[in-house]
Amino acid sequence: MFKDWVTDVFFDLDHTLWDFERNSALTFKKILMENDVRVDVTDFLKVYVPSNLTFWKLYRENKITKDELRYQRLKSVFDRLGHTISDEKIYRLADEYILHLASHNHLFPNTIEILDYLKPKYKLHIITNGFNEIQTKKLMNSGIHAYFEHIVDSEMAGVKKPDAIIFQLALNKAKVTPDNALMIGDNLEADILGAQAIGYHTLHFNTHNEEKHNFCPMIQDLGEIKTFL
């Protein structure tokens, strides 16, 4: 479908190639135990996962700072669970979470296979809202850094997806026009609509079991990319 136009493929990282929820769960299991935080990890994650998505949306919309994101997404969970915990320990958990998150390197099924398939045919890039200090570690530790020519993050761009500036910066670095660019990501607002606004082709990787829509094709497995490229 896209193979007649596309020369460059841009991927989101978290929730698209790098299995954020699985790696995050392993990180919390480690740091909660090591800091003697006596909450059930399963109960913690049931609250944390949707809470984290909510606070990331606020961060994308510039309604909270990075520091507020890191603190509030934890504080809100402990409040919901009725668990008393000091701010000092929350800040320590926030720091240790960032420190250890990239040490877990589970990728979504077929990530390596699809990158091997695409690499000889297309130039591959990353556009991510994640923090610079951790996104590179994720790519390096999971063994996929070498597949990508350019890695553009929100701290580098000074804005976050879906702002057009970050998508334009990625095009400029890759020296490609939007009609030759395909964006693949999990977030409809940030990845799909943001990229479409300046002319990218788009493909929605439905990792959150969202309802079908008409904005672009939707896939359930990365292997399905071969159908389009």
Image: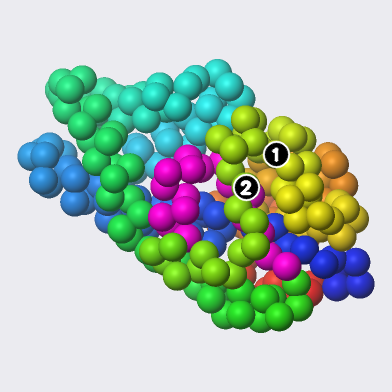
Q: Position of residue 176 (x, y in %)?
A: 84, 56
Q: Position of residue 172 (x, y in %)?
A: 78, 47
Name the disc covering residue 20, or none: none
For this view, does 162 lie left or right of residue 176?
Answer: left
Q: Which residues are magenta?
A: 123-139
Tell which of 122 and 27 is nearer to you: 122
Q: Residue furthest left?
A: 36
Residue flagged by tag 2: what amino acid is it? Val
Residue at the image point whose x is 68% and y is 46% from the top: 191
Q: Position of residue 140 (x, y in %)?
A: 44, 63
Circle 2: element type: strand
User: Is residue 10 found inside the magenta-colored segment of the image?
Assistant: no
Residue at the image point whose x is 28% and y is 34% from the top: 94
Residue at the image point whose x is 56% and y is 35% from the top: 155
Q: Quadrant of residue 31?
A: top left
The residue labelled by disc 1 is 166
Tell which of 161 and 189 is nearer to you: 161
User: Compared to 221, does 73 lie above or below?
Assistant: above
The residue labelled by disc 2 is 152
Look at the image and tell me in which quarter the C terminus lies: bottom right
Tell which of 119 and 52 is nearer to you: 119
Mark pair 1, 2: CA separation:
8 Å
Residue flagged by tag 1: what amino acid is it? Ile
Q: Residues within 10 Å of mark 1 (few under 14, many from 20)?
A: many
Look at the image and tell me in which quarter the N terminus lies: bottom right
For this view, does 53 lie left or right of residue 46?
Answer: right
User: Compared to 173, does 194 lie above or below?
Assistant: above
